[in-house]
Image (tube, rainbow, N blue to C red):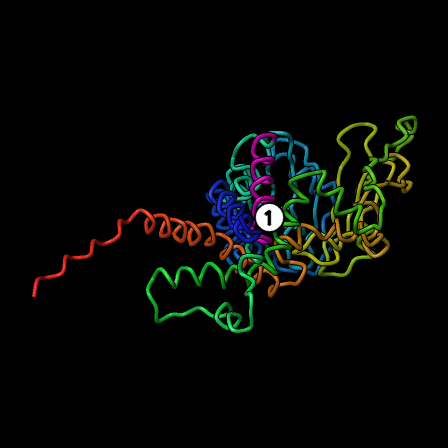
Amino acid sequence: MSFKKIIGQVHLWLGLSSGLIVVFLGITGCILAFEHEIKYFTDKTQFTQEEAKPLLPPSQLRAIATKALHADPRSIEYRGAGKSVFAYYYDEKDYRVAVLNPYSGEILKVRNMNTEFFRVVMIGHYYLWLPPHIGQPIVASATLIFLVMLITGVILWWPRNKAARKQRFTIKLNVRWRRRNYDLHNVLGFYMSWVAVFLAISGLVMGFQWFARTVYFVSSAGKTMPAHEHPVSDTTLAATAGAKGEDIIWQQLRAIAKPDESVAVYLPATSSDALEGAVNHRPGTYYNTDYYHYDQYSLKELPATGIYAGKFKDAAVADKIARMNYDIHVGAVLGLPGKILMFAASLIAASLPITGFYIWWGRRKKKRMPAKATPPSMPL
């Protein structure tokens, strides 16, 4: 058996084994690609009219949100000028968000994220709505198979000579449906593969820890991914601590943030937790965020380790790549053009198992058809 025939068999059977999951991931990826844009036009509670008075500090919004959420929020996020404030509460089973007017503290909406449409789609995309320890390995394995199929598909597509090259780059429209389907699978698959490879690799970074560590090892020229060591507060200072430390930290972070940038304060859940702050310099994405940690009693800044410690601009190249992974996956790192590109890649990726199945089924059916009998010659 020749090399290309072996590659063809690998491509075929991997495609048949993972096709349904790849179709599902492609469709849900298309839905999630423009989540922020869709919410921008459909959810008016995200915005508030700017007023000529100071914003309410986190401690006041925290007290108001606690009554609305029936639980103490874990974080308060000021999302920039003209936008409402989000107060988040989450645990292993529950995830709710209180949307507040930052000037008056009015509760604009309380979201149950467990039933929110895009959140439900995202859970399906990540875990197939199964328990994470079951669903995530299935999704990650299908993504790994998809990456192998991209590589084997390009090998199978690559023309042997210049004469075949022009034919491989175009889709013939004035031909039979079976031939058109063949061209759609091969030509669109080839063009999409150069984008989808980033889609697959970034998905594998989120799906497999060993893959994430491998990417970090390669991008850092041989370094091991550092573990995140969450700093702790000095509990011996609790008796002398001043109140409302989150307000002081919030004011400090506001001073270094631009009006359209978001500032978040992460509240301590235990007596030893650190008080955390974050400034997102590019709302709508996640990578360009600076993280700060403070002793919740003395408000002294504490050192932290890991890829998400400190400022983005000061991070090593490998840490920047790791931070950018999700935004690469959805195309947000390139703005709206990147999202359109990833949407198209997800859509084509969803179509490939379907067009590929029809190619295989057509060949299989053709092999089963008996040859037409030659009629006996008539006597002269």
Q: Is residue 144 magenta?
A: yes
Report the residue at 65% width, 36% height from top.
89
Image quadrant for the C terminus? bottom left
Q: Residue furthest left?
A: 380
Question: Is 43 displayed left or right of 247 in the figure?
Answer: left
Question: Is 234 displayed left or right of 172 in the figure?
Answer: right
Q: Which residue is labeled 1 in the image?
A: 148
Regarding residue 226, the answer to whether it shows in the image is yes
Badge 1: few (under 14), some or many (20 or more) residues near its Cα, within 10 Å?
Answer: some
- Say if 134 sits above or below 284 in the image: above
Q: Which one is nearer the viewer's eye here, 12 or 177?
A: 12
Horizontal and vertical percent for residue 254? 79, 54
Horizontal and vertical percent for residue 39? 54, 54
Segment colored magenta: 133-152
Horizontal and vertical percent for residue 100? 62, 47
Horizontal and vertical percent for residue 225? 81, 42
Q: Which one is nearer the viewer's eye here, 70 or 51?
A: 70
Q: Main secondary structure of the magenta part?
A: helix
Instruction: Name the residue type under label 1.
Output: Val
Q: Which one is nearer the viewer's eye here, 19 or 316?
A: 19
